[in-house]
Image (cartoon, rainbow, N blue to C red):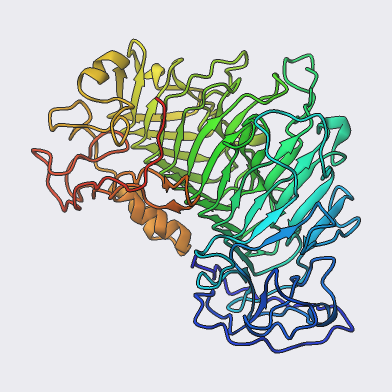
Amino acid sequence: MARFLRAATFIVCFLSAGSAFAAGGSCNSIPVPSGVTSCFYIAASGADTNSGTSEASPWLHAPGMANCSNTCRSTTPTAGEGFILRGGDTWHFGNSSASPYTGSIASCSANNGTCGWVVSWNGSAGSPIYWGVDKTWNAGSSWARPIMTGDNPTSPTGVASCAYDETKYTQFSIAGQFYNVVDNFEFTGICWNGNESNANEFKCCTEILNYSQGSTTPSNNIVENVYIHGWTHVTFSCSLAGNGEPTGSCDGAIALNGTSNSTYGHGDLLTHDVVDGSDTDGLSMIAVAWACYDVEDSVFRYNSNAMVCNNLHILANNLFEYILQSGDGVSHGNAWESNTESNSVNSVYNNIWRNLWLSRDCEVTNWETPQITDYYFNNLIYNNGCAGPGNGNYYDLVGGGQGGATGWTANVFNNTWVLPNGGAVFSNPVGTTANFYNNDCIVPGGGAPSSCYSGGAGALNYLTNKVQDTSTAAGQGYTSSEIYAYSPTAAGNTTVGTGTNEQGLCSALTGSADPLLQAAGTACQSDTGYACTYSTSTHAVSCPARTVVARPGNAGWDVGAYQLSGAQGQTGTQAQPPQAPTNLQATVQ
């Protein structure tokens, strides 16, 4: 179970008047979050007139579903309670003749659309409300996630119409609430019709799970282990503005959605989640939007936009792959675009961006915030073939200051980047500092430092980076076909033992009072964990994907995201050699 407590924030919970409090039953040794002490149970074979306090007497609906009735409706969820849905059962959001059908709630979201399931109760610090599962309780012979379906069939292309139109629809919402944990659900079968544009804001859009609240108070919600897939849409189009960009976002749907404000979503965590459009056209859906405070250990693939967010604090151990050109043919694609940051020290580490084949600009960008210090390390970017007409934000990892902000510092070190069209863009203006250390840049033709770094007039400290020609690097074994792409194979390789020791940067993180930054500091002392391994059969992630190797405490580091274990001339404590991950997915290189 993912960690829950972030800060000892006192929350006063306001519960609806007229509702009865009912004591849940035993949680049956389920690994619920700490502070959850009683549980209610929900199954497709249940009845809302049951007590709901045991697996033998489950409800048919969960509180917050429109069709929840009788004992289910008269029970008010409160802090420290769990609501357990039976594995393998399916709840229907589109087909009203199917059972159990959730029903719909009108005018329940920011776009004044409808919702299928709305959680409107708060947990508290140390006692969350848990919406999850018991992996020993299932409808079939083996456990599977409970399924939330919009009842539309999957399609590898756009469709002429939706069997059940979920335009302007939110499938599941905990928006506006605090200290809720959503765990191990499968969301599928959503279909929408229409584009979002600047003139059509909040008039067409569909969202699958809305998880944050609109205030500056930390909401501390967790969404973990969810699997989102199988969406469809009516074929859409989008017009271009005079600058060659579309008039708005033409995706029309968001899988994991937060509040669009740079100060909202504090404390929220997305972890071990999968948004996988491989059973769709792969040309639609924003995987994560807006509230991206802490996103870890997750997989985003076959989307037109993987992540467009505000209020970033931590981005760690995530796999981004197959981010494709939007189906409208013109939309700007983002593998990761962070428009504003959390007003704190922030860190981006151990992520992989790969196989970004078709997006116009293939953007990997963070816009800096005034007076903020950021740490980027152990990230890999490779096998990307995007060459769109914009290209200005291609790999804009330190993308200047939002609104011309200055005064920030970016520590960019020990990353491995394969840049097919030349250098990353670091738009650091006067009054800012970029510390650029130990990075391995592999580019056609090799070249000068500018092939790895292209910056502005701000201060640049450029030290022990390597700019390798693609063919020269391949001759030493640095290729995408390795188990761990572009890793060194021998002590004599270009990157081995040729970097500077940057333990001081790690110490600055471990010395923080923030446990999230402390974790980043610990990760900084080793090489990359290579994001996560993704099982295409169970749709679960296992992190890290490789056993990390400790970087020397008192000697030079390797250049790039890797540290070669046992290399000649190295000292310091070494971890065990990397072990091959299990259940690998096949990837066409």
Q: Residue at x 38, y 60 (%)?
A: 511
Is the residue 368 above or below the residue 116 in the image?
A: above
Q: Which residue is drawn at 63% across and 87% down?
A: 25
Q: Is residue 137 left or right of residue 516?
A: right
Q: Residue at x 32, y 37 (%)?
A: 561
Q: How many labels does the image show?
A: 0
Residue 193: give x, y in percent of width and height: 83, 35
Q: Is residue 424 left or right of residue 248?
A: left
Q: Who is closer to the viewer here, 266 or 431?
A: 266
Q: Residue furthest top?
A: 445
The quadrant where residue 366 appears: top right
Quick check: can you spot residue 264? no
Q: Residue at x 60, y 42 (%)?
A: 369
Is the residue 32 above or below the residue 307 in the image?
A: below
Q: Who is closer to the viewer here, 396 or 245?
A: 245
Residue 126: give x, y in percent of width and height: 58, 78
Quick check: can you spot residue 428? yes
Q: Who is closer to the viewer here, 367 or 69?
A: 69
Q: Residue furthest left?
A: 568
Q: Who is closer to the viewer here, 236 or 211?
A: 236
Q: Is residue 450 left or right of residue 253?
A: left
The quadrant where residue 289 appears: top right
Residue 447: give x, y in percent of width and height: 33, 13
Is the residue 251 above or below the residue 340 in the image?
A: above
Residue 332: give x, y in percent of width and height: 66, 25
Q: In this view, does 104 lie to the left or right of 316?
A: right
Q: In which quarter of the image is the C terminus?
A: top left
